[in-house]
Image: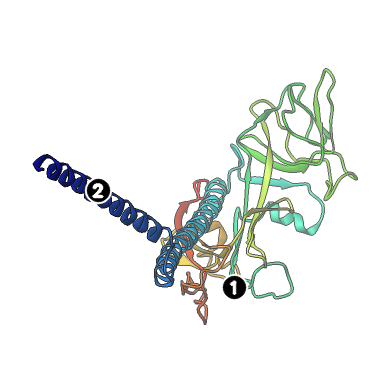
Amino acid sequence: MGNEGERKSRRWDKNTEQENMRETERSIELLIYSKQKGFTVVELLVAMAISAIVITAIYSTYLSQNKSYAIQEEVAAMQQNCRVAMEMITRDVRMAGYFGCKGDTITNTLAGSSTNDYTSAPVVGVNNDADGGNSIKDGTDQIFLKYADTSENIEVTAPYMSDTSAAIHVDDSGSLEVFDIVVISDCNHTSIFQITNISTGAGKTIVHNTGVGSPGNTTKDLEHQFMGNSFIMKLHNIWYYVDTDNNLIRSDHGNPQPLAENIEDLQFAYIFEDGEEADIPDDTDADDTNDAEDVRAVRINVLARTGKVDPAFTGRRPAIEDHAAAGGTDHYRRRLLTSVIRVRNMGL
């Protein structure tokens, strides 16, 4: 009897245990099924809101960095334009007035009234252009500079020709070309002429006849016999100005070449032998002071601006020398470079 009760008890415990296991399995299945039902609308909205915030933050960061990069690129290009402009003008101003070992007398054989430019003062300025009909930006300055190229000195060799001969003997003509305007100089005399022919045979000659080329030569007479220690050099007649498209132009012998873009203003001031300053040399008065021949240094001002506007930035073109500031504001960033350069060949 007792054994039978024990067996029933064990069967009941076993059944109970099995029932409990089944209940546990059903609970697990219900839990799994409940997790597989997906997200609620609230959960989806919260997730979308968080995603939108993150995406907005990322996009805002991208826009900010992209704008910053664009501004930096514009500023870098502006500064480079300004440096290039200043470097070139500085070099030409420093060399103005160099004609080799020249004497006090200069003979100019070039034809045409405009050729007086070659024998005028080595530094000539035009202040605040106001002629609205030309290609020069109103209010900007211009400068004209003359000097002989020191990179190549062509030596005169025997047989030495008379002063009225159209041929000059040389060992090598270098890079000189027909129709180049050159200067020949010793320490007693200087002559300016245009090359009309260069022989390439055994006895090389540089010819300067009349009736050929532009402007051409009015005479072949150099008014001096150039012999040993005489040198021929290419003559530069440089003109700097800013055109109406804000390009800095460098013209040599009337051949304009863009040098730098987005140059908004170009201003010069001239420092004379007596230390006085002026916006332009004055050769029209009779006091013989502050004339072009008295220039000893030039203060150069180059104002560059960015090629594109920055709506978040507000500025205006500043006053430089005697050129007044702009009346209104705009959204261009600007850089101003100023340098005082001694004209080392003036006053020698």
Residue indicated by mark 1: 139
Mark 2 neighbour density, 10 Å: few (under 14) some (14–19) many (20 or more): few
Q: Position of residue 343 (x, y in %)?
A: 50, 50
Q: Position of residue 76 (x, y in %)?
A: 49, 54
Taking depth in this image into account, of 49 and 74 the one nearest to the observer is 49
**Contact check, label 2 and label 1, Cβ < 8 Å:** no
Residue 98 in sight from this viewpoint: yes
Which of the two discs, 2 and 1, labels the residue nearer the N terminus? 2
**Looking at the image, which residue is at 84% across and 49% down?**
214
For badge 1, the amino acid type reads Gly
Rendered image coloring scheme: rainbow
**Looking at the image, which residue is at 52% across and 82% down?**
327
**Looking at the image, which residue is at 64% across and 32% down?**
152
Residue indicated by mark 2: 15
Q: CA distance from mark 2 to mark 1?
A: 109 Å
Residue 272 in sight from this viewpoint: no
**SS under mark 2:** helix
Q: Position of residue 278 (x, y in %)?
A: 49, 68
Mark 1 neighbour density, 10 Å: few (under 14) some (14–19) many (20 or more): some
Horizontal arrangement in the rendering, residue 167 relative to residue 122 (left or right): right
Q: Is residue 132 above or below residue 333?
A: below
Q: Position of residue 60 (x, y in %)?
A: 45, 64
Q: Is residue 295 above or below residue 279?
A: above
Q: Is residue 199 above or below residue 320?
A: above
